[in-house]
Amino acid sequence: MASTEYDPLISLRQSIASDSPIVLATSTEAPDATDSLARATHLHFAVPNRHAIPLDAHTRFFSSEKAVDLRSIFFAWQKKDVNIPDYIASAQQLNDDLTATDQPGRVQNLVFVERLDLITWLEGASDDSEYIKPLEGDSAAARSAAQLASGATGGVGTVPSGAAGARLGKQIDPRLQEIYDLERRMGDRNSILRGTKPTDFSSVRRYSEIFHKDRSKKPNLPAAATAPIANTTTLASRDKKPGRRPDPIILLSPSASSLLRMSNIKSFLDSGTYIPPDSALSSANILHVSRLLPSLDPQRPFRFILVDTPEQFKPDYWNRVVGVFTTGQTWQFKSYKWQNAPDLFKHALGIYIGWRGEDVPQTVRGWGRGVTSAQIEKWNPQQGAAGRWRDREVVEGIWDRIEESMRSKGWSKDGGPVVM
């Protein structure tokens, strides 16, 4: 029967650790089993004793300061091996089924980091979670339940030092106890690399920028001494050295509606495969892609820099911009050197990517031949990346246009564009 004695998360973790059956049922009675999470009202567990917990019971797992119900937790565990688009689509389908069966409540979508943290904790790979509130009180019973769920007690496992951590009802060899006392508890990758919470290193980046600016300041020197120093401080002069050419730059649109963003642009241009930007996690603000352009240099690939904002640009960087991905929204160009779209696309190739079968926006068509348009197949969660075989053809066409544009601007194997 259902009872408030059992914690939903610990019951689920114990069952997973012991490989005990977890039964979906439409009542508190085990015979009323079902395979449908939309029709079920309870979860039945066999450990430590047979008991049932309602699926709408709140757990100690919190998302956006809101307690997540057991149904959402169990659903996330069932979908632990699927990718993000499939997980979201399955959650929507389950919510539709819940509405059809008049079940109260809705499945709550957990973001990638929360779902990963939950699965890691349920599998026993981690004993701590920043999203799980501790059991009420710090009683010995609470600690015992948590240790049993994690596998620290019961079965074969390590035994912490002290009488409190010893396994009840079991005599331990003194020499074995000495070995246990010398054991050092190992953390998981989250606690070792990042601690219990993500670390924000933005302050280090701001400090480094100030440091480099300070280093660029030189003391007052005679004109003859300052001349050679000035010649080495700009990127343009450094690019004029023999055997060195500047890296071309490609600007992305920062719009949330853009099909290509910093999270998925590298896989698209480098591997010829499109994946949704929300399913590819990346916090990088600068990326690099190498590409051989035979008509410019058949031996040495060009190294392209990919960014979505020109806020760190120096004036001479604009001469190196060879492509601008756009969604047709003109606010993207407000911080550019050329804020008028026709002027911008006289200096760099415009690139618009849309879904196959949809019309190209009127604004993009009005910008003329300075913008090339391409269409890709819509993302199919059932096929995933395996169904993206036509993307390669689109990507090759984009690279051909970039190579043609760079050649017309004067790029060569030994140097950058001809600046007029």
Image (cartoon, rainbow, N blue to C red):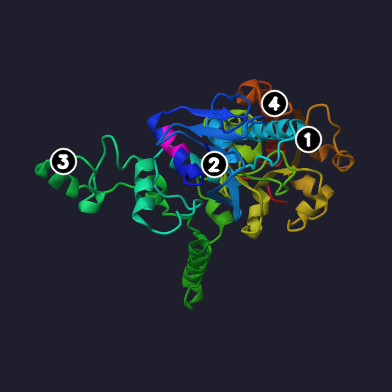
- Tell me whether the residue at label 3 lies in contact with that at label 2, contact meaning CB atoms closer than 8 angstroms: no
Sequence-wise, which precedes: disc 1 or disc 4? 1
Q: How would you rate the neighbour count of disc 3 (Cα within 10 Å): few for under 14, some for 14-19, many for 20 or more?
A: few
Q: Which residues are magenta?
A: 12-16
Choose mark 1 or mark 4, whichever is in front: 4
Question: Could you tell me the amino acid type at mark 2?
Answer: Arg
Taking depth in this image into account, of 358 and 287 the one nearest to the observer is: 358
Choose mark 3 or mark 1, whichever is in front: 3
**Vertical side of 278 occupied by 204: above or below:** below
Taking depth in this image into account, of 5 and 147 the one nearest to the observer is: 5
Q: Label 4 belongs to which residue?
A: 380
Taken as a whole, is the magenta stretch helix, strand or loop?
A: helix
Q: How would you rate the neighbour count of disc 1 (Cα within 10 Å): few for under 14, some for 14-19, many for 20 or more?
A: some
Quarter holding residue 401: top right
- Tell me whether the residue at label 3 lies in contact with that at label 1, contact meaning CB atoms closer than 8 angstroms: no
- Residue drawn at x 77%, y 29% as measured from the top left: 375
Question: Could you tell me the amino acid type at mark 4?
Answer: Asn
Across and down, in percent, residue 191 comes to 39, 51
Q: Label 1 belongs to which residue?
A: 372
Taking depth in this image into account, of 320 and 74 the one nearest to the observer is: 74
Sequence-wise, which precedes: disc 4 or disc 2? 2
